[in-house]
C-alpha cells in the first residue's frame, strides 16, 4: 500500500497538483536545470520527506532551508 501511495504521489507531483507551491518550484527548477544526477536524486528525496511532514515541525524547516 505504501508503494502504491508513493506512486500516486509521484504522478500527482509530475502533474503539479501535489505539494506546496514552493517545493513545486524547486522541482521545476531541478528538472529544467543542468544538475548532476546525484544532486537531483538527493533533492527529490528531501522534497518528498518535506511533503510528508507537518509544516510546523522543526525538521521540515531544516529540510526547506537545505533545499533552498
Image (cartoon, rainbow, N blue to C red):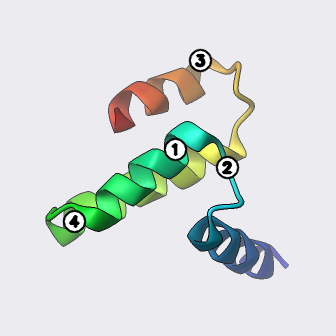
Q: Nearer the viewer, mark 1 or mark 3?
A: 1
Label 3 residue SS: helix
Return the residue at label 4. 38
The answer to whether the residues at label 3 and label 2 have Cβ atoms under 8 Å apart is no
**Residue drawn where x is 85% and y is 79% of the image:** 1
**Residue drawn where x is 33% and y is 54% of the image:** 29
The answer to whether the residues at label 1 and label 2 have Cβ atoms under 8 Å apart is yes
**Residue 55, labelled with which disc?**
none
The answer to whether the residues at label 1 and label 3 have Cβ atoms under 8 Å apart is no
* Cα gap from disc 3 to disc 2, whole angstroms: 18 Å
* Cα gap from disc 1 to disc 3, whole angstroms: 17 Å
Return the residue at label 3. 58
**Residue 23, labelled with which disc?**
1
* Cα gap from disc 4 to disc 3, whole angstroms: 25 Å
* Cα gap from disc 2 to disc 4, whole angstroms: 22 Å
Looking at marks 4 and 3 on the same chain, the residue that comes earlier in the sequence is marked by 4
Amino acid at each position: 500500500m505504501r508503494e502504491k501511495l508513493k506512486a500516486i504521489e509521484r504522478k500527482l507531483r509530475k502533474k503539479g497538483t501535489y505539494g506546496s507551491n514552493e517545493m513545486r518550484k524547486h522541482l521545476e527548477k531541478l528538472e529544467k536545470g543542468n544538475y548532476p544526477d546525484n544532486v537531483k536524486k538527493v533533492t527529490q528525496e528531501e522534497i518528498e520527506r518535506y511533503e510528508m511532514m507537518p509544516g510546523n515541525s522543526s525538521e521540515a524547516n531544516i529540510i526547506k532551508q537545505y533545499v533552498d
